[in-house]
Image: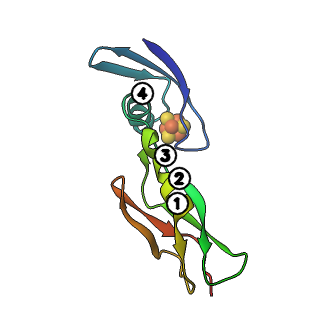
Amino acid sequence: MKRELTCIICPRGCGLTVQINGDNVTVTGNGCPKGVQYGIDECTNPTRTVTSIVRVANRIDTMVSVKTESPIPKGNIFDLMEIIRKKEVNAPIEIGDVICDNVFGTKVIATKQVK
Ligand code: SF4
């Protein structure tokens, strides 16, 4: 199987060709070694950093922006979004505060301060 991808690790956006033959994965078109790992990961275990917002219970009409501390498997994104959708936090909130701990191998942290 052959896949054409664009590497999103840096703004250069190299066009990658990933050739998969069983366990053998080769990547061409990369401008640096990071593109090889990106191509392999994207075709074998794609992950994404998830960003969203969480309701602040003790502030009217206030949401706090959040993101996963590290990327999670793409297949877990909808389950994580459901957890985030049900979550409420109370202010004050500082950037980096843990909003959800131990979810799909990472944490969800605040990316905004709410006083
Ligand atoms: S392969 Fe390297 S140079 Fe090309 S977009 Fe990816 S990180 Fe940037």
Tell me which amino acid carries mark 2.
Answer: Met
Quadrant containing the C terminus is: bottom right
Q: Is residue 72 above or below residue 98?
A: above
User: Residues under labels 4 and 1: Cα distance?
Assistant: 27 Å
Label 4 sits on a secondary structure element that is helix
Badge 4 crowding class, 10 Å Cα cut-off, few under 14, some 14 to 19, many 20 or more, is some
The answer to whether mark 3 is within 8 Å of ligand 1 is no
Label 1 sits on a secondary structure element that is helix
User: Residues under labels 4 and 3: Cα distance?
Assistant: 17 Å
Residue in the image at 43% along x and 36% along y? 46
Pointer 4 and pointer 1: residues touching (CB < 8 Å)? no
Residue in the image at 47% along x and 52% along y? 80
Pointer 3 and pointer 2: residues touching (CB < 8 Å)? yes
Badge 3 crowding class, 10 Å Cα cut-off, few under 14, some 14 to 19, many 20 or more, is some
Residue 84 tag number = 1
Pointer 2 and pointer 1: residues touching (CB < 8 Å)? yes
Badge 1 crowding class, 10 Å Cα cut-off, few under 14, some 14 to 19, many 20 or more, is some
